[in-house]
Image: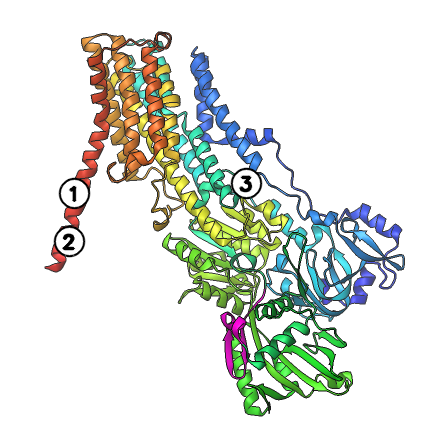
Amino acid sequence: MFFNIKVDEIIRMLHSDEKNGLTGEEAKKRLEMYGKNVLAEEKRHTFFEIFLTQFQDFLILVLLVASAVSFFIGQASDAIMILFVVTLNALIASFQEYRADNELEALKELSVNEAKVYRDGRIIKVPFPEIVVGDIVFAESGDLIAADGRIIECSNLQVDESSLTGESVSVDKDSALIEDKDVPLADRKNMVYSSGIVTYGKCTYIVTASGMDSEIGKVAKMLSTEEETLTPLAEKTNEIGKVLSIGCLVICALIFVLGFMHGNKALDMFMTSISLAVAAIPEGLPTVITIVLSIGITRLSKKGAIVRKMHAVETLGSANVICSDKTGTLTMNKMSVEKVYITNRLINKDEFSNNKSIAYKMLVNIAYDCNDSNINYDENGKEVRIGDTTEVALIELAKRSGITRDKKERFTELPFDSSRKMMSSVYKEEGKYIIYTKGASDVLLEKCSHYVCESKIKKLGEMDKIGFYNQVNELSSKAYRVLAYAYKVVDNIPGEDEIENDLIFVGLTAMIDPPREEVLDSINECKKAGIKTVMITGDHKLTAEAIAKDLGILSEGEECITGLELEKLTDEDLADRIGNISVYARVSPKDKVRIVKAFQNTNNVVAMSGDGVNDAPALKRADIGCAMGITGTDVAKNASDMILCDDNFSTIVMAVKEGRKVFRNIKKAMHFLISCNIGEIMTLFLATLLNFPMPLLPIHLLWVNLVTDSLPALALGVDENNIDVMTQKPAKKSENIFTFGFSVRVLFEGLLIGAVTLVGFWYGCTYYSLSEGRTFAFLILCLSQLFHTFNVRAMKESIFDDSPLKNKTLIIANIVSAMLAIFVVLIPVLRNIFVLTPLGTSKWDFVLTLSLVPLVSSEIVKLAKGLFIKDNSLLTQVKKSA
């Protein structure tokens, strides 16, 4: 509200004094009353707290219940094994999250910076946290704004507010009263805001809000109210846990009833039901998911992406919308001269270094010397940019054009003024005075009487002006920021009113915050992968549209709307139009959150990238928030799930690719483990139905689930057979992991494994003994599941289409698991614990033959399906040609 109240009224309202400021005693009282000028810190979770959160997963809770039941009925060894696996899983996940937790204290720079403040009638330096409402603060070029404030007076003031508003260039400020009450934050020219940087000029302002009451504080409050969403994998894992639990209860009850009807004892049937429960639950699944995600995190960290939350890896793989901030994410967050106009000729940036024309050299010299900025290098050779981003861009232009000299010694100057919209520097050379002037084209052209044409100077006529203005309008329509340049040589320095008259026009520069070079390819890759890229920015609509079109974000027929237009849309209207809007300009932090929510409410998985304070609430709300590691503010990093060390949009696309690999591999592991568990269920269920003895004991099932299956499942989790992941559309958020096709395939494979296991058990019991029957069943179950891994890895293709030998980890895991199962039978101590019996050579041949049946059967089905599809395709072509 302070932007439309007169300064003297504000000073009176806040009980301050324009000349003397607050007294030290009053400042101390206000500090005690209102608190320090810092943001509320988010409580950091301890390792133990993170550890406890791992037990919220539904599948983990099911395992804990199974462990408790096993312990209750006297199966202590089973209970201990399940608890060991669950605890190991929780420890691995907790360690990864704790290690990757790079939370930083929000805006901790405030504790080390100092502001120049009027206290007791004199200027003193006060640490930022001790700034209070009512303080009179002085700031000049290079200073950080300590708190929100109303400008009392200023001179040529420009402030970089990109971290708060998203505006890519410094904003001209003044102290004039704003009459309109409905003014966006970015257009409040008489206000300065905490986190802003003075890039030019100086000012005195009165603090109107500090700490959590500042605009940044409001953003921080939004962060605390935004709920984190459950990741797609977490939802699907919970879904699997519920399906397995319900299915398990139904089958256990059915088996108990059937067994009781067959005349079996109630206690025996209860034990059988518990065994079936152990068989139904894939105890190794949570650990496999955790380790696969952990491996994904390690891979991403090596490629420049630090994942703070483990499930963020797979969430990226499910993302079908990337909402990206423009400034600093899609663009370089620094102005760059892209074109120079001289003598009726437009020069592109790739021609700058080779241009030798007199007019071009003159323009570059004016841009270089009529300039208060510079580019230096620190002791490590790192580039340090000093001054306004527009002027720094002109220094870069000069360096690209071959200027290596120091700036000339300035005789005098007329600084930039927002009312004049020009800046002039005067130099003395060989007894004459050279005046260099740059400024807004519409103002400077009216001050010119001549212009440079090739190597000649010609009189500037009205038609010439019209031609120059047409060029200005054409460049401005493409969102370029256009500056004009002129000079004159005089014998004596005229008065200030005459210095900028009767100038010689030289040319124009067109600059813009350019897109990152690699972003265009990344956006095209996103399109192929079925991912919509959306630009969200605080910049003007024209600028946003131009950049979006250059990058391929805004296609023909798609919309670009402003924050004010967005406010007028109801949630229903936004939901209807959200798919067609690709650019949002001039938006506020709450607008960004609303956009993210709108996408989520229309069944999308949203990744949000950004670097500024203004991006933080949306980063937290999004399914996956990606903060920039170099230019990103601490607030943005705090709110994110992943930090991009290189600030590269392409790293997001790389992370999406890695996430898709992880998700596909986890799905392979799920496919393998669940189909194997169905095989175990079918073995026990059919045995009960046929009134057979128990083919497998609980310890056999735990061994298969925790030892035999876990290593191959992990090997599938690191499989590299995922070349085509970025050519397929991501699965819909609402899509059930148990699709019809997936469910049929898993059931079919489980039935095959269960059938061959039961056949082996029947054969052993019929021709040998119950002990040998169980030994057959145990070995066939183990080995058939290991052969089944090759079938799962190939998914839809034959195992011969992509050699299994490419995944050496899987080969080794299968060999180790097979050897461990064989050792259980061969080593007497283990054999006695598992109640098994040794087998002769011919019996091993029988075990191996039956174990291969599920793999061979699946290959035959794939072959038949492939031939059917091929025949249908051929038939369709014949019909079309006919």
Picture quadrant of residue 687: top left
Count neighbours of disc 2 (C-alpha within 10 A) and say few if under 14, some if 14 to 19, many if 20 or more. Answer: few
- Residue 390: percent from the left, percent from the top? 62, 68
Q: Which mark is residue 876?
A: 2
- Under circle 2, the secondary element is helix
Query: Is 85 on the left or on the right of 209, as rendered?
Result: left
- Residue 532: percent from the left, percent from the top? 42, 55
**427 vs 220: above or below:** below
User: What residue type is disc 2 on?
Assistant: Thr
Picture quadrant of residue 332: bottom right
Tag 2 or tag 3, which sits nearer the N-term? 3
Tag 3 or tag 1, which sits nearer the N-term? 3
Residue under numbered circle 3 = 308
Over which residues does the magenta segment extend? 335-355
User: Which mark's residue is nearer the viewer, 2 or 1?
Assistant: 1
The alpha-carbon separation of the residues under discs 1 and 3 comes to 47 Å
**319 vs 419: above or below:** above
> Residue at image x 19%, y 35%?
861
Q: Which mark is residue 577?
A: none
Residue under numbered circle 1 = 867
- Residue 798: percent from the left, percent from the top? 24, 38
